[in-house]
Image (cartoon, rainbow, N blue to C red):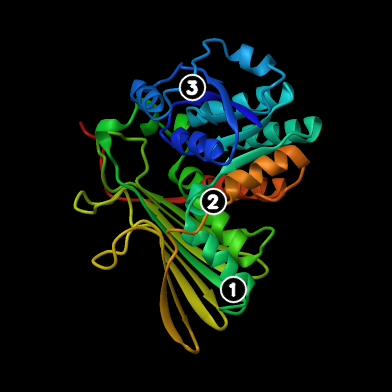
């Protein structure tokens, strides 16, 4: 499988490119235009053998290119994806895949009309080994029926490395449409829910006074026919934490629970991908860091076989729709005032 890169405005592009190459795909090149030269520099440093192609149409017209990979400014992602699908390419895109309902509807139409794959890499599940182990335990019945999830998605603000579009919801999407899509995706996956309802949602602003439109706090309560879920996302990771965020996900079952501490075990064991489980027999910790991630090779197989093993198309669209609904209906809280 050959892929090309159009849209290198976010550092997540490194993970998408690296994951596909590690899974056996080859890269036909990348379009170097970017809103953030630091991302381009990082791409060249990590993948020095990849070639720059100035004209995106050349990659879209290339019949040997099967997939377009994209981490453009979120506002532009739907348009790039639709154009790629119209040229017969499947798409792997960074989250958020879309930031408004019109774009979602347009992408859905393009998928229906072209039969191409629109896959959003929800990396907090799809690229973390502990999430793979949790899925296996749940499938084996280790904690019984899953009835509730709690997802925490704190992020470090990193003001100095953020491009201007990051602070503008019209270009980046709001905090729920963006970050909380991870937690919504995991809720649907681990509870086995095909759909859900947003019970309530909140967006807040408690800091970042000099960016009046930027949202730095959000939370959602949602419910499906099978389970309920709570999620909190924010931009308040303190500088003293040795990683960008203490991301955690707790899965409650009728016979026990699992907690994923994905990026560190604060004041505990070193490294990433810690899984803790409690059941009627006791408690245990599982080091999941060596578990292989399967998303990229499953995606390659789906491109080859026209299958849905990485995730179903319906699942992707449901996550996007719920994240947009949560953003649209959110109540606003917070005490920050714009700088005078």
Query: Percent x, y for residue 209?
Result: 25, 38
Compute the Cα span from label 3 to label 2.
25 Å
SS at mark 3? loop
Above or below, comparing residue 24 to residue 139 in the picture = above
- Which of the two labelled residues, at mark 3 and mark 2, occupies the earlier sequence position? 3
**Quadrant of the snapshot with the N terminus:** top right
Judging by the rendered image, the residue that carries numbered circle 1 is 146
SS at mark 2? helix
**Quadrant of the snapshot with the C terminus:** top left
Query: Percent x, y for residue 44?
Result: 40, 23
Q: Quadrant of residue 115?
A: top right
**Is there CB contact under 8 Å for labels 3 and 2?**
no
Judging by the rendered image, the residue that carries numbered circle 3 is 50
Judging by the rendered image, the residue that carries numbered circle 2 is 126
Q: Residue at x 51, y 44 (%)?
A: 177
Above or below, comparing residue 229 to residue 141 in the picture = above
**Is there CB contact under 8 Å for labels 2 and 1?**
no
Foreground label between 1 and 3: 3
Q: Residue at x 57, y 35 (%)?
A: 93
Between 233 and 5, which is closer to the camera in this rendering?
5
Name the mark on residue 194: none
Between 267 and 182, which is closer to the camera in this rendering?
267
- Number of residues whose C-alpha sits closer than 10 Å to that of mark 1, classed few (under 14), some (14–19) or many (20 or more): many
336 on left or right of 250: left
- Which of the two labelled residues, at mark 1 and mark 3, occupies the earlier sequence position? 3
76 on left or right of 161: right
Query: Percent x, y for residue 338?
Result: 26, 36
């Amino acid at each position: 499988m050959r892929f090309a890169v159009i849209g290198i405005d976010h550092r997540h592009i490194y993970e998408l490119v690296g994951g596909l190459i590690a899974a056996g795909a080859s890269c036909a090149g990348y379009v170097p235009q970017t809103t953030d030269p630091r991302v381009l520099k990082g791409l060249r440093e990590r993948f020095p053998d990849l070639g720059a192609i100035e004209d995106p149409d050349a990659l879209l017209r290339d019949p040997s290119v099967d997939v377009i990979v994209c981490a453009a400014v979120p506002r532009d992602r739907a348009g790039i994806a639709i154009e790629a699908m119209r040229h017969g390419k499947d798409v792997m895109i960074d989250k958020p895949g879309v930031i408004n309902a019109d774009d979602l509807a347009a992408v859905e139409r393009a998928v229906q009309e072209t039969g191409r794959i629109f896959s959003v890499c929800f990396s907090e599940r799809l690229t973390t080994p502990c999430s793979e182990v949790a899925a296996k335990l749940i499938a084996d019945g280790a904690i019984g029926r899953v009835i509730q999830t709690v997802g925490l998605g704190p992020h470090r603000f990193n003001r100095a490395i953020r491009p201007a579009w990051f602070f503008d919801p019209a270009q980046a999407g709001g905090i729920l449409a963006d970050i909380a899509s991870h937690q919504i995706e995991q809720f649907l996956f681990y509870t086995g829910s095909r759909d859900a309802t947003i019970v309530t949602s909140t967006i807040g602003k408690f800091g970042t006074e000099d960016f009046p439109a930027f949202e730095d706090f959000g939370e959602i309560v949602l419910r499906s026919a099978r389970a309920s879920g709570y999620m909190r996302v924010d931009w308040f990771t303190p500088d003293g934490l040795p990683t960008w965020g203490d991301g955690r996900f707790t899965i409650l079952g009728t016979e026990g629970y699992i907690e994923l501490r994905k990026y560190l075990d604060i004041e505990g064991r070193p490294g990433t991908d810690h899984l803790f489980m409690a059941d009627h027999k006791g408690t245990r910790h599982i080091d999941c860091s060596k578990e292989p991630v399967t998303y990229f090779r499953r995606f390659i197989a789906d491109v080859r076989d026209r299958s849905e093993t990485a995730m179903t198309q319906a699942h992707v669209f449901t996550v996007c729709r719920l994240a947009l609904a949560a953003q649209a209906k959110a109540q606003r809280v917070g005490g920050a005032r714009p700088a005078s």
